Amino acid sequence: MFADKDISKFNNIETPFYYYDTDLLQKTLHTCADAAAPYQFHIHYALKANFNPVLLNQVKEIGFGADCVSAGEVRRAVEVGFDNKKIVFAGVGKSDKEINEALDLDIFCFNVESIQELEVLNELAVKKGKTAQVAIRINPNVDAHTHHNITTGLDENKFGINSWDLPECADTLKASPNLKFIGIHFHIGSQITNLDVYKNLCVRVNEFAAWFEDKGFKLQVLNVGGGLGIDYYNPDHQIPDFGSYFKIFNEFLTIKPGQEVHFELGRALVGQSASLITRVLYIKNGKKKNFVVLDAGMTELMRPALYQAYHKIENLSRISNLRSQTPIKYDIVGPICESTDCFGKEVEQPESFRGDIFAIRSAGAYGEVMASKYNLRDAIRSVYSYEI
């Protein structure tokens, strides 16, 4: 990912910052679009992964829609120029204010996650004299076999409507004149690398679609969510296997004439496009532990502290020394006053020194968007490959 000219120029840029490889992003977006095209699948980009305006412009230009989980994300999608009729609004806790704002923008669809939300949405639509298109998010009880904190499709999760509530859900839809029921929606988790999981999801989607059709509903949309993972261990220009991913849904979903299949991809599209670039402040060598103290911390990249996520860490200043030296094991930590401010423990690196430039890879998803000002830290900056 990094050319020598880039690394040398990093020395002259104040750290920490996110470095975006916009060429790789373009290639990833085109690969995804080309893989989906033969099946006429519809892609909505999940803004929660990264709502950096430069990235959003590239996603918009490829023709994808937007998957939003707050009114702020809906607003950002509209500001960037996404077609309102390609915007879907999900989220287990939409406020009345957020719903009203999305109604005023005439978005494509609300992905509704509870019976009470259906009732509230209908009441608000009545007051505005509008009809809201809705898809019912169903909890399919499919195990995504990923980290517990990013699993969303089990009975124990807060997301979606459980199967035993569907009869009441159907009655509520029939009693809601200002709602237009257009489809069903699923999302079983994030960072899914075992594609067989999606075969199980397809079986459940087929079952729920048949259930609604038996009740007299016509489904226009089958929204299967996203969750496709990336390879955090091998980040160099690694693009997910979109071809195999989409092929599973084409083969295992029962798609009736006129039905649309929608996806909500985030991490798979942008995850490899950025690295967090940071500088060594201090080296602390001890009897039991050696520490590299960076100027970036959990305020810039929360994932390792939040759920022990792995990111490949590279000392760019000493990359040529990695093969010629016996590596040293370091705990790679940040400056934040928390013991959990750690990017990796016992990470093998060439001998490192104050001022060395480090890259924390695969940080394009859930990196910049989760940054905070804890400890009154300065806001993290972004640098793009076309700028250097």
Image (cartoon, rainbow, N blue to C red):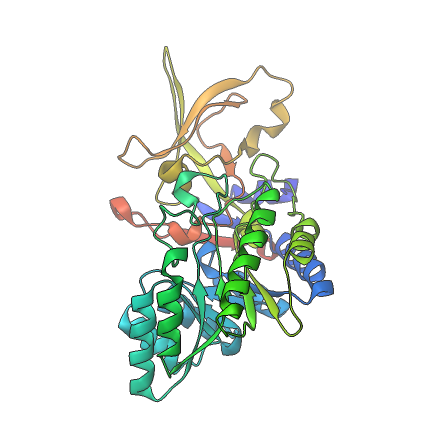
Give coordinates of residue 258: x percent, y percent: 64, 74
Q: Residue visible at 52% across and 38% down?
A: 359
User: Where's the N terminus, which quadrant?
Assistant: top right
Residue 297 shows in the view: no
* Residue 93, quarter of the rendered image: bottom left
Residue at the image point whose x is 53% and y is 54% from the top: 204
Viewer-side residue, 139 vs 386: 139
Outermost residue, top side: 287
- The answer to whether residue 348 of the structure is visible from this angle is yes
Q: Is residue 20 left or right of residue 252?
A: left
Say which of 124 and 9 sits in front.
124
**Residue in front for this viewpoint, 56 or 244:** 244
Pick out the residue farthest to the front: 214
Residue name at image x 70 percent, y 52 percent: 243
- 217 to 203, vertically: above or below: below
Q: Report which quarter residue 285 is drawn in.
A: top left
Residue 336 drawn at (x, y percent): 30, 37
| Left or right: where 18 falls relative to 61 | left
Query: Where does residue 320 sit, x and y in percent of width and height?
Result: 63, 27
